[in-house]
Amino acid sequence: MAVQKRKLTRLERRAQPMPDVIPHDEPLEHQEASKMPVVASTKLSNQEPSRTTTTTTSMARKPKSLTNKQKLKIQRGLEISDKLKNKASKKIARNLNRLTAKTIYD
């Protein structure tokens, strides 16, 4: 079996040079600036420090959409509830018919 390659993250893809692009010579000032290590922070710089982490993180998160499995379970649940309602309504109708038949023939 072949070993499956790990999918690169966005930062890793951006860090790799593109094979088609030929690098051009930069001026000396830019070379010195590019040699300085840049620390990438995980937080956005324009975010304010949150007072309470529980409220701000829960409000900032985007709600996840349902998976297909969850959608199918919900759909199946609706089908089952429809069947039960249909069964109950038929049962009630049969009881009413029996009662009316009893009153007619008695």
Image (cartoon, rainbow, N blue to C red):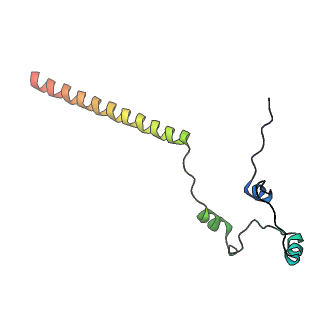
Q: Residue 105: horizontal and vertical position, in percent?
A: 10, 21
Q: Is residue 27 above or below residue 65?
A: below
> What is the count of numbered marks?
0
- Please, which residue is most extreme toward the bottom here? 29
In this rendering, is residue 10 above or below 72?
Answer: below
Quadrant location, the N terminus: top right
- Between 59 and 100, the residue placed more toward the observer is 59
Q: Residue at x 79, y 67 (%)?
A: 40
The vertical placement of 66 against 43, above or below, is above
The location of residue 56, given as percent across then percent down, is 63, 68
Left or right placement of residue 52 versus residue 8 in this view: left
Q: Tell me which residue sits at (23%, 31%) in the image.
A: 93
Q: Is residue 5 visible?
A: yes
Residue at 10 percent across and 25 percent down: it is 104
Which one is in front, 81 or 101? 81
Residue 57, picture quadrant: bottom right
Q: Nearer the viewer, residue 72 or 45?
A: 45
Can you give x and y, in whole percent of width and height, for residue 92 in the image? 26, 32
Q: Quadrant of residue 44?
A: bottom right
- Viewed as shown, does residue 15 lie left or right of 74? right
Going by the image, does 43 lie left or right of 89? right
Toward the top, the furthest residue is 105
Residue 100 position in % (x across, y down):
15, 28
Can residue 106 be seen in this snapshot? no
Viewport quadrant of the C terminus = top left
